[in-house]
């Protein structure tokens, strides 16, 4: 698959009326517009998966800082309700991540992952903080 990740990300941001920022040839972010005039930043990273020796892409979005009063069991149970997006904790933040291998996906599949990650992260950011900050 001849694929320019950042061209895809930029084109998709334009298609949905979002904003695009490139970090480097394998990392960029889209600000995804959502319902109720809300927005969610989704970071996309193309990277080699050493365990399976394949190229993959991972999309992630911050939900909120890690905190002792968060019901992590509830978040893990929510993971069963999604297709691509899953809750994770990374660098003292709760995030939503979705990933796939490039050899088994299409551009439409990548768009679905971006949307699911953005919507789930925004939903839970609001449930846990009452804010729209990420």
Image: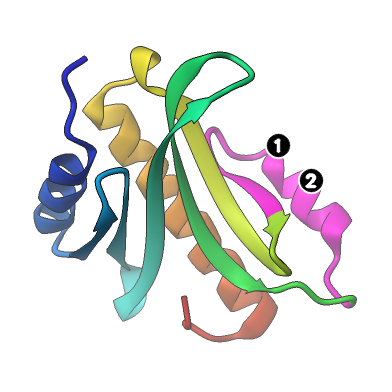
- Give x and y (percent) for residue 32: 30, 63
Residue 28 bears which disc, if any? none
The answer to whether residue 14 is magenta is no
Which stretch is magenta? 69-88
- Give x and y (percent) for residue 70: 83, 71
Query: What residue is at 32 percent from the left and 34 percent from the top?
Result: 110
The answer to whether residue 84 is magenta is yes
Location of the N terminus (image quadrant): top left
Query: What residue is at 10 percent from the left and 48 percent from the top?
Result: 11
Position of 37 with respect to 7 (left or right) is: right
Query: Which corner quadrant of the image does residue 82 belong to?
Result: top right
- Give x and y (percent) for residue 87: 67, 51
**Label 2: how many Cα within 10 Å (few below 14, some 14–19, many 20+):** few
Query: In this figure, which residue is indicated by the disc labeled 2?
Result: 77
Near-viewer residue (83 or 29): 29
- Give x and y (percent) for residue 59: 44, 46
> Is the residue under label 2 in contact with that under label 1 (CB below 8 Å)?
yes
- SS at badge 2: helix
Query: What residue is at 71 percent from the left and 48 percent from the top?
Result: 78
Query: In this figure, which residue is indicated by the disc labeled 1?
Result: 80
- SS at badge 1: loop
Query: Which corner quadrant of the image does residue 42 belong to?
Result: bottom left
Position of 31 with respect to 90 (left or right) is: left
Position of 35 with respect to 81 (left or right) is: left
Query: What residue is at 10 percent from the left and 52 percent from the top?
Result: 15
**Label 1: how many Cα within 10 Å (few below 14, some 14–19, many 20+):** few
Spatial separation of the CA atoms under disc 1 and disc 2: 6 Å
In the image, residue 109 sits, relative to residue 61, either above or below, namely above
């Amino acid at each position: 698959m001849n694929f320019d990740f950042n061209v895809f990300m930029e084109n998709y941001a334009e298609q949905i009326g979002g904003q695009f920022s490139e970090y480097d040839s394998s990392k960029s972010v889209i600000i995804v517009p959502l319902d109720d005039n809300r927005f969610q930043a989704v970071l996309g990273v193309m990277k080699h998966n050493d365990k399976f020796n394949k190229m993959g892409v991972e999309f992630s979005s911050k939900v909120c800082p890690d905190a002792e009063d968060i019901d992590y069991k509830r978040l893990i149970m929510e993971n069963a309700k999604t297709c691509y997006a899953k809750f994770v904790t990374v660098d003292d933040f709760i995030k939503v991540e979705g990933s796939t291998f490039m050899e088994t996906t299409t551009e439409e599949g990548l768009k679905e992952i971006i949307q699911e990650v953005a919507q789930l992260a925004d939903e839970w950011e609001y449930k846990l903080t009452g804010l729209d900050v990420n």
